[in-house]
Image (cartoon, rainbow, N blue to C red):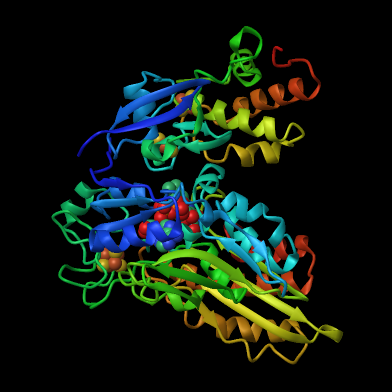
Amino acid sequence: MMRVPPFKYVAPKTIAEAARALRDAGPEGMLLAGGTDLLPNMKRRQQTPKVVIGLSAVKDLRASLRGADGAVTLGAGLSLTDTARSPLVADAAYRALTTAASKVATPHIQAMGTLGGNLCLDTRCNYYDQNHEWRQAIDFCKKAPGPHGTAQREVTHGTCWVAPGSPRCWAVSSTDTAPALVALGAEVTLVSADGERRVPVLSLYKNDGMDYLAGKRRDEVLTAVHVPALVGWRSTYWKLRRRGSFDFPVLSVAAALRLGPGGVVEGARVTLGSVASCPLEVTTDALVGRPLTDEAIAAFADHAAKPARPLDNTDYHLSWRKRVVREYVVGALRELRGDPPGLLARSAARVLPVLA
Amino acid sequence: MSEIDVGLEVNGEQVRARCQPHDTLLALLRYRLGLTGTKEGCGEGECGACTVFMDGEAVDSCLVLAAQCEGRQVTTIEGLGRGWPDGLHPVQKAFMETGAVQCGFCIPGIIMSAADAITRRSDAAREEVRRLVAGNLCRCTGYTKIFDAIELARDRVARGEVRPEA
Ligand SMILES: Cc1cc2nc3c(=O)[nH]c(=O)nc-3n(C[C@H](O)[C@H](O)[C@H](O)COP(=O)(O)OP(=O)(O)OC[C@H]3O[C@@H](n4cnc5c(N)ncnc54)[C@H](O)[C@@H]3O)c2cc1C
Ligand code: SF4
Ligand code: FES
Ligand code: FES
């Protein structure tokens, strides 16, 4: 039976106290929100902070509001269940976010896990998400070198079992809400003991399995997510996983679209998740200014699938995963165009053993 | 590390417990309070055997620190039937009558999730029932009788055939 290793517990009541506690703890400190990522990682000795700063008593992290300009602010401490159900994001424009949140893990974990924790989720790999003994048996990899196995931000030593010749770690960004929020053009507020700043969600991430959160300093608390008003937009989120519950995404496509008169695309944003160590934004210039025909979608899907280079460190065969990227992009755009769901499911079923 | 003191409500009673900062709520319930109805399966959120209610919502107690429970309200399988006829929640009765239990290890967790589901959605169709207990795994039954039992309980509650005692 796996036990959580010992640590000192700190329970701040305000954001300012949390930021100070995080600064004071230095590299040994970590924030704990819902704990659904950090606690399993601690039990498996992938992350072993000496100081844990629990955020559950920080009420200000759960505050949400709609501003005068129609933009929505969601507190980073909002549970995924509350995010999916929030009346502030009930509009079809935000469906990518609400769908992504409602497809995380299981209903229990959605009730516990938070939006902020989901954005800061550790990257995943079949050789890393294993208990200490398993990893010791094949020898620890770069991301969490022994003896204690705490995940590092920089390569110090060790091999990568996925790409042994490679200087970097290829662990996969597996957060569901990050690709959705990137497609919605969202930003986040980061607060430290010396001030606060607001940055685009995408800028939090780096394509590096170890330094995946390079855009956030270690001493910063992610306090809120800001989603713009998005008048006239529609969005969706397609997630691939083996089971309809529990499983992390193996691929996700978040797409947002604004169609003008005559079905001409006025704006489009597409983001891929779980195919790299960060969410990948796809350039959509080719879609904008013309109608969303089958041909336009097909050409765009070929372009979108190019940067996706899945490696053999998650579920399913990698060449098949690569092929599905294209089909999921097609499916998501056709859904946003208004194709009937029955038709979508039938055409998707031709290539997919599982439609998540 | 020094022990901490946590005050919380468990099954309607105010409890003060001493525990380690790294104890989970599950460990607090089982090893400090002797409430062993809640089971530990995987310890990683992968099975739901440890399901309890925290402030009325079904959660995996293996992934909650006891330290996070200060001032919270927790209900376990031992307290679920409080206020119902014979001290049994309608879901518990239905599981007994339907023969939905085999080895039983997953059952306390499944009953908690099911009770949460039918309280929230007494009109839930089978698909919705399945979704609401999708955080619980059973290695024995194949689920059919489990869903039959949950639907039986749901229908009885919806028709007003069983009510909490005043
Ligand atoms: C069985 C199982 C299945 C899962 N499936 C999925 C899935 O399908 N999709 C998915 O996306 N996730 C999945 N998860 C992971 C996790 O449950 C979610 O990502 C959840 O949203 C994490 O949020 P949390 O509040 O529990 O994070 P925590 O575990 O509390 O924290 C996660 C990380 O974020 C940091 N952090 C937390 N809050 C803040 C903050 N405010 N500011 C800065 N840093 C912060 C923590 O220090 C930690 O590094 C799964 C987990 C389990 C156990
Ligand atoms: S990608 Fe390589 S270095 Fe990174 S976690 Fe997997 S095995 Fe370790
Ligand atoms: S023991 Fe908690 S989910 Fe398995
Ligand atoms: S009855 Fe044995 S695991 Fe469900």
The answer to whether residue A70 is above or below residue B4 is below
At x 73% / y 81%, what residue is drawn?
A294
x then y, percent, for residue A155: 21, 73
| Residue B110 visible here | yes
A218 or B34: nearer the eye?
A218
At x 45% / y 70%, what residue is drawn?
A190
Image label count: 0
- The quarter in which the C terminus of chain A is drawn is bottom right
x then y, percent, for residue B162: 74, 15
At x 63% / y 13%, what residue is drawn?
B97
A190 or B123: nearer the eye?
A190
Indicate left or right for A179 with B103 as reference. right
x then y, percent, for residue A216: 39, 72
- The quarter in which the N terminus of chain A is drawn is top left
The answer to whether residue A36 is above or below residue A284 is above
Query: Ligand 2: which quarter?
Result: bottom left
At x 43% / y 25%, what residue is drawn?
B38
State the image quarter where residue A30 is shown: bottom left
x then y, percent, for residue A291: 78, 87
* Residue furthest to the right: A262
Indicate left or right for A188 with B30 as reference. right
A114 or A247: nearer the eye?
A114
| Residue A316 visible here | no
A310 or A116: nearer the eye?
A116
* Residue furthest to the top: B86
State the image quarter where residue B156 is shown: top right
